[in-house]
Image (spheres, helix red, strand yellow):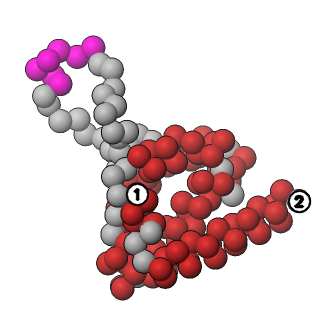
């Protein structure tokens, strides 16, 4: 809830990230030789969230509570797109994102109930 009112918290936790938009090359003034060197991007909460979503079948069988928390976070980010649009855009653009959310019928059920819970929470907070 804090990042609804202080979006800089969300930016600090999610960026920089190793996730990229497909076909997007960041502009750089570096020399061609420097472009060949790998850049060390810090690991962010957004990277961790994507790693969980990318492992839906495994988590469905072993760590359902962790998966439920990840789905709730995605739902909350989606709900707060005004402040979280960068994170949402990056997640949606990842290959396999939509497939991960549709992976299992149980996950669809969990997403539905998570989303309903988030909407109810938002109604309580926003009045």
Q: Would residue 85 be seen by someone viewing this image from the given angle?
A: yes
- Frontmost residue, 88 versus 16: 88
Identify the residue shown where x is 52% and y is 40%: 86
Q: Residues within 10 Å of mark 2 (few under 14, many from 20)?
A: few
Q: Is residue 88 left or right of residue 81?
A: left
Residue that extends furthest to the bottom in the rendered view of this protein: 61
In the structure shown, which secondary structural element does the residue marked by tag 1 occupy? Answer: helix
Q: Would residue 7 be seen by someone viewing this image from the given angle?
A: no
Q: Quadrant of residue 123?
A: bottom right
Indicate which disc, 2 or 1, sits on the residue closer to the N terminus: 1
Residue 40 coordinates in the image, percent (x, y): 25, 39
Q: Quadrant of residue 54?
A: bottom left
Residue 41 located within the stretch drawn in magenta: no
Q: Is residue 109 above or below residue 27?
A: below
Residue 52 coordinates in the image, percent (x, y): 38, 66
Q: Is residue 125 left or right of residue 14?
A: right
Name the residue beneath numbered marker 1: 97
In the structure shown, which secondary structural element does the residue marked by tag 2 occupy? Answer: loop
Q: Quadrant of the N terminus?
A: bottom right
Name the residue beneath numbered marker 2: 127
Residue 6 coordinates in the image, percent (x, y): 68, 44
Q: Is residue 104 left or right of residue 114?
A: left
């Amino acid at each position: 809830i804090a990042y609804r009112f202080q979006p800089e918290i969300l930016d600090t936790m999610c960026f920089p990230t190793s996730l990229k938009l497909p076909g997007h090359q960041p502009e750089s003034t570096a020399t061609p030789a420097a472009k060949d060197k790998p850049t060390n991007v810090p690991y962010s909460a957004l990277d961790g969230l994507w790693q969980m979503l990318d492992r839906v079948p495994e988590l469905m069988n072993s760590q359902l509570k962790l998966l439920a928390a990840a789905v709730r976070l995605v739902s909350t980010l989606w709900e707060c797109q005004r402040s979280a649009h960068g994170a949402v855009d990056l997640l949606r653009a990842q290959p396999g994102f939509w497939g991960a959310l549709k992976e299992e019928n149980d996950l669809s059920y969990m997403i539905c109930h998570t989303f309903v819970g988030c909407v109810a929470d938002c109604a309580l907070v926003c009045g």
